[in-house]
Image (tube, coloured by chain):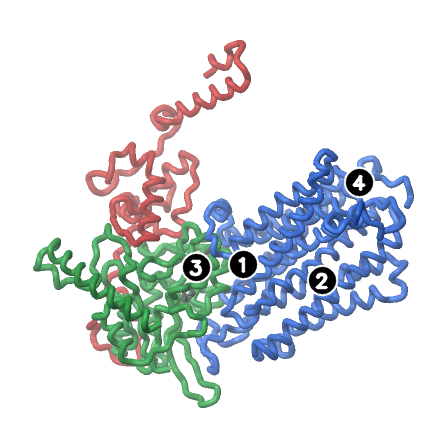
Chain colours: A red, B blue, C green
Amino acid sequence: MARVVNQPGLGKGFRLAACLGAMALLAIPSMPVVAGVDLPKLEHAKGDKCVDEGGYIRRHHPELLKHHRDETMRKGIRTTKYSLKKCVECHAGSKTGSVAASKEDFCIACHSYAGVKLDCWDCHATKPGKRPSHQAAQPAVPSLMPSNGGSQ
Amino acid sequence: MANNICLNQKECGKSTGFWLLLTLGGLVMLGTLSAFFFLEHHGHIKTGMTNQIVWGLPHVFAVFLIVAASGVLNVASIGSVFGKKMYKARARLSALLALTILSGGLAVLVLDLGRPDRLIVAMTYYNFKSIFALNMIFYNGFFAIVGLYLLTMMDRKLKPWYKPIGMLAFLWRLALTTATGSIFGFLVARAGYNSALYAPMFIIYSFAYGLACFIVVQAAMYKWNDIEIDEAVLCRLKNLLATFVAAALYFTAVLHLTNLYFAKQWDFERFLLSDGGIYTLLFWGGQVMLGGFLPLLLIFSPGARKQPAILLIAALLVIIGGHAQMYVTIVGGQAFPLDMFPGYAESSSFFDGVVHAYSPSVWEMMLAVGGIATTFLITTVAVRVLKFLPEDEIKDPSSTVGQH
Amino acid sequence: MSESMNSKLEDRRDFLKASALVAGVAVGPGVLFYGIAHSRSPEEGASSKQRWGMLIDTTKCAVGCNDCVTACNTENGLSGKTGEQDSQWIRKLNIKHLQTGVEHNLPMLCQHCENPPCVDVCPTGASMKRADGIVLVDRHICIGCRYCMMACPYKARSFVHEPLTEQNPEVPRGKGCVESCTFCVQRVDRDETPACVEACTASGHQAMLFGDLNNPESDIAKAMKTVATTEVRADLGLNTGVRYQGI
Ligand code: SF4
Ligand code: SF4
């Protein structure tokens, strides 16, 4: 980078562009290159492999999740491959049981390292849930009428 | 008129005053921003707004400013569309205020959003069926058109465009206020809002509020520059304000009479006009008396011809009355419970069938005044660095430019 | 309305026959009985062939029973608090006729309007209606302006006033967005009924019926054909998906 900047006769604009270009090049293979700084240590996930190749997921998970969110939310398509809920099920940390409760947890570890704010967890559960079963819907308050045993 | 008017305040050497004003506005703005961050962190739980009263004090202030913003442009419109020279001298200030007041109003609306961080979403996803989204388009257009309008006034080369753009701005602002009024008119389910009169009524209100704001700012600038307002100009503005205020009163009466005799909204009208507590008080005491009859009395009082202070007070009263009106319209309209089953009394855990209470917290008050602070700050800076002071060269304000 | 509804039902019938056939071929005869009416695969998505609706028999709805509300709170992770700033997706409403004094007792919830005012006014398109008639808020693009709450004639919506944690993984919800009854869309999508309906049935009152209004074979469509039902604020012409009987 320095070499480019020092070359005489190059316009200011060109130099700026070159700098930006060089920065972009550095950024692409991001993590290995900037080694030396503490890389986030990620806990091993449950299950033997991710739904896709790791590097692909690392680069594209924002689009994948966004696409999936619109499909599920707006069209009611409930495939599980890129579902956020499924991510949480495998990646919840063993200590906290969550993907975003502590600095070591899966999402936060990387995102704080990369300095990218995320607001998924304002609304989404960070822990895998027990899927609410029929029992969960049982009234917690006794009703006035005797129950007939919950038959549907 | 004295010919030693100081057009560019920088030369007047009154810097201390300028910085004082700026500090004052800055402090209020600081309060607003801290309230904003506080609410952004804790949520609207720290406001008095509830699931019953979903729009509160911030909306009262914001909608007042938005309505006033389109009205304040009236002064410029009379100048360019109808060619009145006295108003032409005030066109720049009028256009500037239209921009700054609208900025203030929109700022409060944005700061009050549940997810203000998604402003970019609001700008990129449009539901074109929504009158609210339509309003956003109107606001953006208003900025662009009035900005251009201002340019045609400031740049000689653009002079040929002055009239057509003035005309466009005039029409656009009518549309804008219609759209703002329709925000409420569209809420058919609510007794208080279900009226087609809302849109035209908001236009009349905007005339009165806008002119009142203009008079106040002009008075402040004249004081600042030690200028006495021309008597004839004073007289003109005073009569114009009186006309608008009277028209606003008339429209208010028509709205409530239609509700009573045609739309049969008796329950709501009884609530508003006699049993509504604070809303009844604000309606009669604030909107009708302070904002209507009292300014009229002042304007037509014998001393008003010679006393600029009286006009100033009348204008301030109109502004206060305008806020009362917005409070009655926005909060009062929600406080009255929805009637889902006509002919039945309703009750539930969700406050059905009862008049909803609202007591704003200090946080939302701080948020609400942020609009005024924004307007104040931008205006103060703008009038200092550029030429906005209305200057009257001629004695006869009724003379017109060109062929009328 | 009933005429257009009938012609729609006719279409549905044909479609259902066809789709049952397809399903039968695809899945094999053994599984066919499982969900002739509305079973669909995860890839399939909601379809306008269906319109979900609810019929509430106010004569069966018991005074003081709150089972539907409790079930909703549990399923959707609501606190159950009833302060002015707390969310309530479904509430028990008591109405008393001003002249005769006759009282009715009923659950009030989002009516899943066919022409929903909340969707019309929403500036961003966050309020939306799914193809199968379920009205939802897309919290990803809701800016929290609350205009939809102003527009809803049934006060069906709540604004989340404070930060939330420990949400149900299937029901994301959070501060600054508006929310309302979803007909338990997560359950409907796997062929279950909404939690309130299930609880009402479990309590023995059987006041709530949920199903596909477009399927003439469904219990709800059959019931709507035989009894007089009421649309709340029918004057607004919203063609609500929730109907009441006995008022
Ligand atoms: S009941 Fe209210 S929230 Fe539900 S769809 Fe109708 S307008 Fe929207
Ligand atoms: S609060 Fe959200 S859903 Fe409701 S109108 Fe505003 S953006 Fe739409």
Instruction: Kindly identify which residue carries mark 3.
Output: C119
Residue positioned 16% across, 60% down in the render: C20
Q: Secondary structure at mark 1?
A: helix
* Sequence-earlier tag: 4 or 2: 4
> Image height check: is C227 above or below B225?
below
Instruction: Kindly identify which residue carries mark 4.
Output: B16
For the residue with label 3, is its CB less than 8 Å from the closest atom of ligand 1? yes
Instruction: Kindly identify which residue carries mark 2.
Output: B320
Amino acid type indicated by mark 1:
Lys
Amino acid type indicated by mark 3:
Val
Q: Chain ID for label 2? A: B
Q: Secondary structure at mark 2?
A: helix
Residue positioned 74% across, 70% down in the render: B289
Amino acid type indicated by mark 2:
Ile
Amino acid type indicated by mark 4:
Thr
Instruction: Kindly identify which residue carries mark 1.
Output: B46
